[in-house]
Amino acid sequence: MSFSPEWLTLREPADADARAVDLLDPLREWLAGIDRPVIRDLGCGTGSMGRWLAPRLDGPQHWVLYDQDQALLDHAAASMAAPVTASAVRADVTALTAADLAGADLITTSALLDLLTADEVDRLAAACVGAGCPALLTLSVTGRVDLDPVEDLDADLAAAFNAHQRRSTGGRRLLGPDAVEVTAGAFGKLGVPVRVSPSPWRLGSKQGALAAEWLRGWVGAACEQQPTLAGPAKGYLERRLDAVAAGELGVVVHHSDLLADSE
């Protein structure tokens, strides 16, 4: 589950625009009165969640950042600005337990759940609930993509891409677009309610670089899953990239954010 820092940097502004701000008021209420809340960010990447959320919570905070990539961890920790402090833990986030997360006042993730299996989500939910604090789990894909203008091949590519997201790899069956429902169910089984809010990417002419890179990855994954699409997809991708370059393609990639409230 490693991603290049270039990709993570490219998507950061769209992620920031997309995250569901309506979930923040319950978090502020939960953290009110805690002098220096401890926030554990799982799969932190370059630290974009911290850069987005810390200023919106205000005041001193301590972030504990988890990732398997030491270079990303170093970048993320160095990017946090006073009065926020940060420490880094190199770890497999799928193996964390309630004991590992003890002392947290909030647990966060971003663009992680759809890369997990159902068993891994069950363990993550149990660890969060065991830590006794809310969990803000953002930017999970839902499987829906809207392109404007529409082309006939859109639906076939979307179906193949979603199947690719649900593929089995290394003995792991990924959740892909099922992650939101499965995660809500995992917390629900533990008696913890989950609020779900939409957090779509909206890519227009100002996000052309991201739209182009996303298109290449979306079409490429679809063709990997269903090789018969490769022929028609070649011309499709060329047309779509030309439209991006001309500022004539709109893309909405649907995600959802979840807030698991331990109260």
Image (spheres, grey):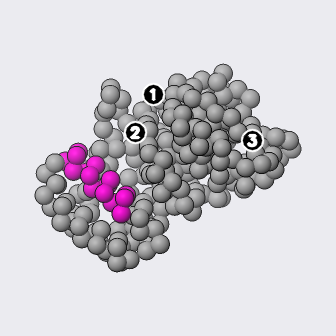
Q: Mark 2 points at which residue?
A: 175
Report the front residue among 239 and 96. Answer: 239
Classify residue 184 as left or right of residue 226: right
**Residue 210, x across and y down, in percent:** 42, 62
Classify residue 185 as left or right of residue 101: left
Which is the main secondary structure of the residues drawn in magenta? helix
Classify residue 222 as left or right of residue 232: right
Residue at x-position 32% and y-position 26%: 171
Single out the mark in the foreground, 3 or 2. 3
Of labels 3 and 2, earlier in sequence is 3
Q: Name the residue under label 1.
A: 119
Quadrant of the image occupied by residue 30: top right
**Residue 160, x across and y down, in percent:** 25, 50
Q: Which residue lies furthest to the top in this view?
A: 99
Look at label 3 and name its amino acid: Thr
Quadrant of the image occupied by residue 166: top left
**Residue 162, x across and y down, in percent:** 32, 49
Look at label 1 and name its amino acid: Asp
**Residue 111, x across and y down, in percent:** 50, 46
For label 2, count other residues whose C-alpha is less than 10 Å away and answer few (under 14), some (14-19) or many (20+).
Answer: many
